Image: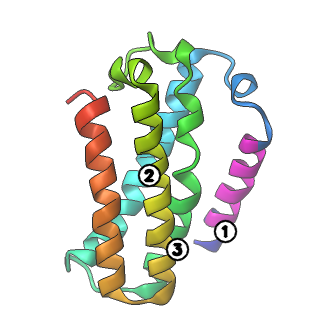
Amino acid sequence: MNKIAGYVLSVAALAMATPATAQFQKPEDAVKYRQSAFTLMGNHMGRVGAMVNGRVPFDAKAAQDSTRVLALISTLPGQAFAANTESVQSKALPAIWKEQDKFKAGYDKMVAEVAKLDAAAKTGNLDAIKTAFGEVGGTCKSCHDNFRAK
């Protein structure tokens, strides 16, 4: 897991070092990028969620590993919602571009809540993780309700 996290951190650092407009050769590339980031986020949220909901035994290290990846990856997809991606078929609703301030505020809140979840996981306290996990889930739901096609 540490090798994967190191690789993800390296790729993310490289990606953030280049302006978003230069990163994506085509609008479709930006859409694939953000979809990939959200897929990874969903995977790691699912791992933590399984512990939070008692479907698997709580493992503090595994929770920390997943939230560390979540904290990094959550910062990545926002840059891939460029105006030129609006016409690419995806689950992103036009409201993202029509209500950019609302979308950005929700996205920023999600990133902040993920950082709190990562901090809670570092304590190893399952109750703190449960609380923070619920807050992250609320931000995800809000965005999905307002900006993602069913």
Which residue is the site of mark 2?
Answer: 109
Q: Where is residue 39 in the image (x, y as percent from the top left)?
A: 42, 45
What secondary structure predominates along the stretch shown in magenta?
helix
Residues under labels 1 and 2: Cα distance? 29 Å
Q: Name the residue under label 1.
A: 3
Q: Can residue 74 be seen in this view?
A: yes
* Magenta-colored span: 5-16
Name, please, the residue furthest toward the front: 101
Which tag, 2 or 3, sits closer to the chain's start? Answer: 3
Q: Where is residue 83 in the image (x, y as percent from the top left)?
A: 54, 16
Q: What residue type is labelled 3?
A: Asp
Question: Which numbered dot is residue 65?
Answer: 3
Q: How far apart are marks 2 and 3 (CA)?
A: 21 Å
Q: Does the magenta stretch include residue 37?
A: no
Is residue 46 visible in the rendered structure shown here?
no
Q: Nearer the viewer, mark 2 or mark 3?
A: 2
Residue at point 19% right, 30% down? 150
In the rendered image, the vertical position of residue 132 relative to residue 78, given as above or below: below
Queried whether the magenta region covers residue 10, the answer comes back as yes
Along the line of sight, the residue nearer the viewer: 124 or 142:
142
Q: How many labels does the image show?
A: 3
In the rendered view, tell whether residue 79 sits above or below residue 123. Answer: above
